[in-house]
Each structure stands twice: as structure tokens, then as C-alpha cells.
Amino acid sequence: MATFTFELVSPERLLFSGEVESVVVPSSEGEMTVMAGHAPVMAVLKPGVVAVSEGKGAVRRLFVRGGFADVGPDGLTILAEVALPMEELDVATLAQHVRDAEEDVADAKTDEARQAAAERLSQLTELRDALVH
């Protein structure tokens, strides 16, 4: 299978950089699978799991919250506000993300900001429920 370059970066660190076969990206418009030769696109991320297929059945899973994905001729770059390997994500960490999102809803000054924060809260709650079960 053809490969392409993928990088996932957060403000704290570079979480992944290398050649991959495919990447499933949790975008605000729905999950999208990026493979070699994908059309250029930019997408806003929703909280969720990026699944990176490195080949030979190996799949690395990384939690992301906020940011965007950019597919271009050179490959895929994800710039995430928060990103960490799923092994580092526990129920307590996710619960803190949910509490932060609840505060964002309460602190929103406009209907548009409140709606965006509520959507983010809903996505995080869904992810937390999936992690627990």
C-alpha cells in the first residue's frame, strides 16, 4: 500500500512524524480517512481519536481536542490544541476535559460561543462514555 508523510503536533510536543498508510481524522464534519494521494483539504478537529495505520496491521491511537488537519501535496499535518497517546488518556484526564468544557459553556458570552462550547462538551462526553465502556 502507498504511504505518505504524517505529522501530529501539539503545543507541548511532536507526537508523531513518519510515513503511514492511512489516518482516520475526527473532523467537525465527520470522520475522514486520509490515504496517499488524498485531495487537498483543511478540516477543523472535534475531540476524538486519530487512528494512524503504520502498516503491517499496526495502528496507533492518539486523542486530540481542538485544532485542524491540513492535507496537502506533502501529506497530512494535524495541529492540535491538545493531543496525547491513548495510553496516557485516563478517565480522570478526560473528566477534567469535560469539566473545562462545562466551564466554557457557562462562561460563553454569546449564543454562538455557547453553542460551540456545548457541541465540544457533547463530543467530549461521548468520548468519555466510549472510553469507560
Image (cartoon, rainbow, N blue to C red):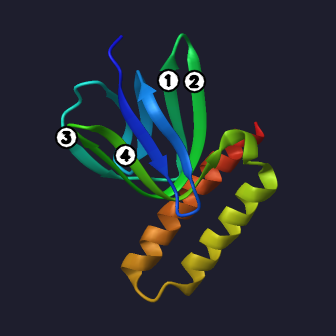
Question: At x 43% / y 69%, what residue is drawn?
Answer: 116
Q: Which mark is residue 77?
A: 4
Percent from the top left, x then y, of residue 87? 73, 40
Few, some or many residues within 10 Å of mark 4 (<14, 14–19, 20+) = some
Seen at 50% across and 84% down, the residue is 108
From the viewer's perspective, tell me whether residue 9 is left or right of residue 93: left
Where is residue 115? Give x, y as percent. Answer: 43, 71
Q: Mark 1–mark 2 contact, CB under 8 Å?
A: yes
Residue 56 at x, y percent in the picture:
53, 10
Does dot 4 land on a helix, a strand or a loop? strand
Earlier along the polypeptide chain: callout 2 or callout 3? 3
Q: Earlier in the sequence, mark 1 or mark 3?
A: 3
- Residue sitting at 22 percent across and 26 percent down? 37
Alpha carbon distance from label 1 to label 2 = 5 Å
Which of these two is toward me, 14 or 30? Answer: 14
Secondary structure of the residue carrying tag 3 is loop
Give yes or no for contact between labels 4 and 3 (Cβ–Cβ under 8 Å): no
Q: Which residue is mark 3?
A: 40
Image quadrant where one finds the C terminus: top right
**Sequence-wise first label, 2 or 4:** 2
Residue 21 marker: none
Mark 4–mark 1 distance (CA, rounded to whole Å): 15 Å
Identify the residue position indicated by label 2 in the image: 59
Instruction: Inspect the image, locate mark 4, and give the three-letter code of the amino acid beneath it.
Output: Thr
The answer for how far apart the CA atoms under marks 1 and 3 are is 20 Å
The residue under label 1 is 53
Tag 1 secondary structure = strand
Q: Amino acid at mark 1?
A: Ser
The numbered mark, 1 or 2, whose residue comes first in the sequence reads: 1
Amino acid type of the residue tagged 2 in the rendering = Val
